[in-house]
Image (cartoon, rainbow, N blue to C red):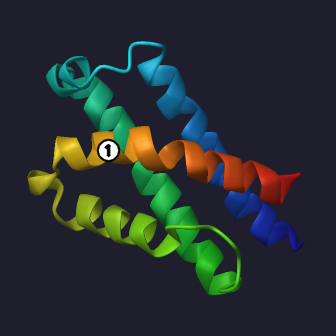
Amino acid sequence: MENEIKKYLYDISESIQPIESYLGDKRDFSVYQKDKMLRRAVVREFEIIGEAMNRLIKLEPKIKISGALQIISMRNRVIHGYDKIDDEIIWGTIIRHLPVLKAEVYNLLA
């Protein structure tokens, strides 16, 4: 695997870890929704994940990451529609899709 591909995978991994850390064991949507700093921190990490994924897909279009195009699309919505970020979509991504992404990225890096 090329070093540049590993770099983007590592960048994604390095943004997943803080999201998990920010939320800790208290994965509660109402807490998330009330904490502006937490929401902004999580959204920033998703921006990084989406940008790294975009560059990764351009470099290696056949890489096996489920939801790669949806991740890029979410990044674009967050960046360009910052005033219309839907907390429920972000939260759903955290709960349903982040664990899958984490496993896939870690497997590719192994």
Residue 80 shown left or right of residue 25 in the figure: left
Quarter holding the N terminus is bottom right
Percent position of residue 79, x then y: 27, 62
Q: Quadrant of residue 72?
A: bottom left
Residue depicted at 27% across the width and 25% down the height: 37
Query: Is 78 rendered above or below residue 66?
Result: above
Give, as a three-letter code, the residue at label 1. Answer: Gly
Q: Mark 1 = which residue?
A: 92
Q: Is 40 displayed left or right of 15 in the figure?
A: left
Q: Is residue 63 left or right of residue 76?
A: right
Judged from this view, the residue extending furthest toward the left is 83
Q: Is residue 45 visible?
A: no
| Residue plotted at (19% across, 41% down) | 87
Q: Secondary structure at mark 1?
A: helix
- Locate residue 20, reporting x and y percent: 52, 28
Q: Quadrant of residue 32?
A: top left
Q: Residues within 10 Å of mark 1 (few under 14, many from 20)?
A: few
- Residue 22 in the image, given as x and y percentages of width and height: 45, 22
